[in-house]
Amino acid sequence: MKATMGDHIAKGQELAKKAENKLHACCPLFGSNFEEAAQLFHKSATSFKLAKSWDKAGSLFVKSSKCHMKVDNNYDAANAYVDAAHCYKKTSSAGAISCLNKAVTIFTEIGRHIMAAKYSKEIGELYELDQDIEHARLHYEKAAEFFEIGDAATSVIQCKIKVAQFCAQLQQYQKAIKIYEDIARQSLHSNMLKYGVRGHLLNSGLCQLVQGDFIAISNALERYQDLDPTFSRTREYKFLADLAASIDEEDVEKFTRVVNAFHGITPLDSWKSALLLRVKDALKEKEMEEDDLT
């Protein structure tokens, strides 16, 4: 007979009670009781998970983690915090983030940097979902650092790309430009990554465009050409050069035509579209100022 949610809750409560009894019987000389309590809390949490009682399951995984910590079983303690976080994700991103932060701290302390990176990235993703871009950026940066320690080059680049995107959203354009150029430079030396170079340089160029300095944009295009001599033969280079010309001429209509022509062949994602809209708005503002003067 298939167990019902009520059955899972009843079993979870029974196991949680047994775990609490183990804790009350614990003394400093008998660490095995903490280990047994940790296992019972884990089983209890799993039962509450099956009943979709997410907050209760999360709190029991936290109790399991604390029992593991009592006997220096740090790896299992960190994993229990991760289990708790994945339950809390169903009801509260704040609860999930809190548990993941604890897991990251433990994984860092025991030298499991790839695990610390993985869950720092997950924290970043949760902040991104909540539209908290500044905190998302910080945790992707931390993930990149941990992946670097763990010698996971591809994951480092993936996280740094996200950091650059967030920097641009936060109008930290120079930081975004540096990251994109660094990634492009690194990618040139990898057979697997070199095909992404034109995209990184395009993103860097768009960040240059938002700042509206024609000389800086021209210098950037020369720098990209020096970095990758094939770049000047790409559609991305022509797109940036044509956009730069329309900015120099303060021609909003030309700017719009260039964007639409590129988008017709290579659809622009929401991030690029948002940056280009900032450029267009700045151009319109200049046009209006000049109209007022005349």
Image (cartoon, rainbow, N blue to C red):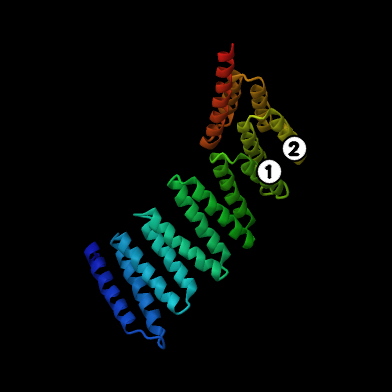
Expressed as whole percent of the image width and height from the top left, the position of residue 245 reads: 68, 23
Query: Is 284 situated left or right of 68 in this image?
Result: right
Label 1 vs label 2: CA separation? 10 Å
Of 82 and 267, the residue lying toward us = 82
**Residue lying at the far top of the rendered structure:** 294
- For marks 1 and 2, the one nearer the N-term is 1
Q: Quick one: quadrant of the C terminus?
A: top right
Task: Give me the residue at 25% from left, 74% from top.
Answer: 14
Q: Which mark is residue 200?
A: none
Residue identifier under label 1: 181
Residue identifier under label 2: 223
- Mark 1 lies on a secondary structure that is helix
Amino acid marked by disc 2: Arg
- Mark 2 lies on a secondary structure that is helix
- The relative height of residue 17 versus residue 260 in the rendered view (above or below) is below
Expressed as whole percent of the image width and height from the top left, the position of residue 126 reads: 45, 51
CB under 8 Å between discs 1 and 2: yes
Expressed as whole percent of the image width and height from the top left, the position of residue 20 reads: 30, 77
